[in-house]
Image: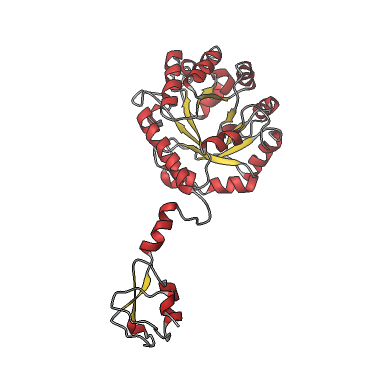
Amino acid sequence: MQSTHPFSLHRTIKDNGVFVIAEAGSNHDGSLAAAKRLVREAASAGAHAVKFQAFTKDGLFAAAAYTRLLKLPANALDGVKKIAFKKEWYPVLVQEARQAGILFMSTPFSPEAVDDMERAKVPCYKIASGDIQCVPLLKAVARTGKPVILSAGLASDDDIRAALRILKRNEVALLQCTVSYPAKTEDLHLRRIGTLAKRYSVIAGLSDHSTSAVTPAVAVACGARIIEKHFTVTPNAKGGDHAMSMSPASFAAMTGYIREAFVSLGLDEKRLTPQEKKELVFARRGIYAAADIPAGHRLREADIVALRPCIGISSAKWDSVIGKRLPHARMKGESLTKKDIR
């Protein structure tokens, strides 16, 4: 369904062609100043939205079970506290984004984070691939009535349909995603984008975990109208998603490729451009005398030749000219006109 909320994915895509999200994630490394810089740089790089991830250690992990399952040290998750998004940042970054001319977004990982985002009047929600089955989180987002972008990286058709039932009153978009960091080219399966759009009658796009600047443009050719790509201002930094994120320069190049790809899609039926209409004369061929032809001569194929430009009789009329009598003499290289055929 289309949103009646002030922010609408359909309207945004109608205005921009492709909605580009800079996924800042946790690449702020726990610094508000760094988060503000990410907002500004994302806007400068051509993104329409910048998105952060709103998680806390206790709101996302059962620490003992998680570390035991992965055979990690008991304190392995202590670093999460450093990069956790702080709820007091919301109003600051929403304002920063407004001033930069870019939309602020966030991925909540708990119902409490949804409440924080509502207080900050965040206009659109993103649900991570891993949470497509998280009923309490989906219900919390559904209650907002706001647009939702749902990553379907780990999802079966049943998973998607179940989530859409919960989000039935929200405007929903689905993103193809490969949950690998980074994702290999052969694992991207961009054809699924068109399948998602057709099967579920939604806007579809790509949450791209590859390191390629070209893949999003290919995704646009496959029907993507939302592109999400990891973004950092410190690509050589340790931790977070820095290593698989695009720098401002690379992101700017990517947005250029995306827009070029979208514009190049054009129409699904042939319409001649003004330049092509001019080329109709110069690129096509007319019928010319292959040798001097006397008046009264009945034309044979050997008497004529198809050459550019197409003036007089078009070479498309070749068969209809053969056998006709020429009332006027024509010199070699002269074009034949309708007056010359009887």
Quadrant of the frame with the N terminus:
top right
Colour scheme employed for the rendering of this structure: secondary structure
The image shows residue 51, relative to residue 180, as above or below, that is above
Query: Residue at point 36% right, 83% down?
Result: 301
The image shows residue 81, relative to residue 274, as above or below, that is above
Quadrant of the frame with the C terminus:
bottom left
Query: Residue at point 48% right, 17% down?
Result: 78
Query: Residue at point 34% right, 79% down?
Result: 304
Residue 23 lies, in percent from the top left, at: 48, 28
Residue 283 lies, in percent from the top left, at: 36, 63
Residue 188 makes an appearance in the image: no
Residue 107 makes an appearance in the image: yes
**Which quarter of the figure has residue 55?**
top right
Horizontal arrangement in the rendering, residue 333 relative to residue 218 (left or right): left
Decide which of 55, 214 is in the foreground and name it. Answer: 214
Image label count = 0
Decide which of 59, 245 is in the foreground and name it. Answer: 245
Horizontal arrangement in the rendering, residue 334 relative to residue 271 (left or right): left
Residue 286 lies, in percent from the top left, at: 38, 71
